[in-house]
Amino acid sequence: MFDLNGKNALVTGASGGIGAEIARTLHAAGATVVLSGTRIDPLQALADELGDRAYVLPCNLSDAEAVSALPKQAADVIGSVDILVNNAGITRDNLFMRMSDDEWSSVLDVNLTSTMRLCKGVIRGMMKSRWGRIVNISSVVGTTGNPGQANYAASKAGMVGMSKSIAYEVASRGITVNCVAPGFITTAMTDKLTDDQKTAILGQVPAGRMGNADEIAAAVLYLASPEAAYVTGTTLHVNGGMAMI
Amino acid sequence: MSDVADRVRKIVVEHLSVEEDKVTEAASFIDDLGADSLDTVELVMAFEEEFGIEIPDDAAETIQTFGDAVKFINGAA
């Protein structure tokens, strides 16, 4: 089950905690992976750790031209992109009343517009090969909302609507488009929270703990696998029961 | 019959699984040959590959019939 031998995957945000784990998991299932992100050192360290079938392609997702070029660069390196995981994302939190246009647009650009561009860039090849998997990493807050995150929540909810629309268009060509929506996951970002903040967060999570990056990666692996061919346009929530939707 | 027309017809016949004699000059991909909008995108992709040309989106929208396609490719090649 979930054998990705012979498949080529492009993972954005692979220098982060969740992205790196997604790349590791797809690689372990047999896929060749292109690791993209802004920080070259952790990408290279991950590529060295994975060994064969792992390549690094740095890309700044706020640079529209660089984003549009990425799918082609990836295809040049690995031959095709069969699996695209849009995992990269940024936050610039602020109360909505204080949120600047720049805070709004930078988050929408990186999280949503770059996802759109990358989907566009890979879909032609997927149409030709009659097989493709796109997994967009959304967030529980795209569904529930979160104070201070109007921009981030909008970008993550936008991802869901966009994924469903693309899923409609390309379903007949063997291409699926789905989202994974993580809840609170232990990463470098959440390590910075104080104990009080963590306690408050865990009060909302029936499972009583934060999730782990490998639990997100497992959901991505499933949606990327041949076994998930009949699953499209859906959002798989991985949040310990925090929001049952 | 020009070489271009033959090659375009072959692509249309293969892609849309239609009889060759249905692919006439005025045959509309969508109205006469049963293509959906995604098929027309794929046809344009196939034409680009076969003839080594770029067909911009605004030009692609004007290619509605077999005759349109042959005419455009003859102009572009």
Image (cartoon, helix red, strand yellow):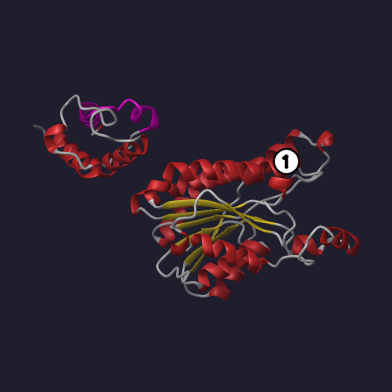
Residue at the (78%, 35%) spot, across then down: A100
Left-right relation of A62 to A125: right
Can residue B49 be seen here? Answer: yes
Residue at 69% x, 37% y: name it.
A105
Magenta stretch bounds: B56-75
Q: Is residue A31 magenta?
A: no
Where is B44 relative to A37, above or below?
Answer: above
Quarter of the picture containing the N terminus of chain B is: top left
What is the magenta segment's predominant secondary structure? Answer: helix
Compared with A156, B70 (above or below) is above
Q: Position of residue A210 (x, y in %)?
A: 76, 65
Q: Position of residue B25 (x, y in %)?
A: 16, 26
Expressed as whole percent of the image width and height from the top left, the position of residue B60 reads 34, 31
Point 13% across, 37% down: residue: B20
Q: Quadrant of the C terminus of chain B?
A: top left
Identify whether A103 is placed above or below A211.
above
Tell me which amino acid carries mark 1. Answer: Asn
Chain letter for the residue marked with disc 1 in the picture: A
Q: Is residue B77 left or right of residue B59?
A: left
Count neighbours of disc 1 (C-alpha within 10 A) and say few if under 14, some if 14 to 19, many if 20 or more.
Answer: many
Camera-nearest residue between A235 and B56: A235
At mark 1, the secondary structure is helix
Q: In the rendered view, does B57 fall on the left or right side of A244?
A: left
For disc 1, the marked residue is A151
Q: Which residue is at the front of the view, A159 or B54?
A: A159
Q: Is residue A15 visible?
A: no
Does B73 appear in magenta?
Answer: yes
Residue A237, position in %: x, y? 64, 56
Taking depth in this image into account, of A216 and A51 the one nearest to the observer is A216
Say which residue appears at 29% left-offset and 27% top-offset. B64
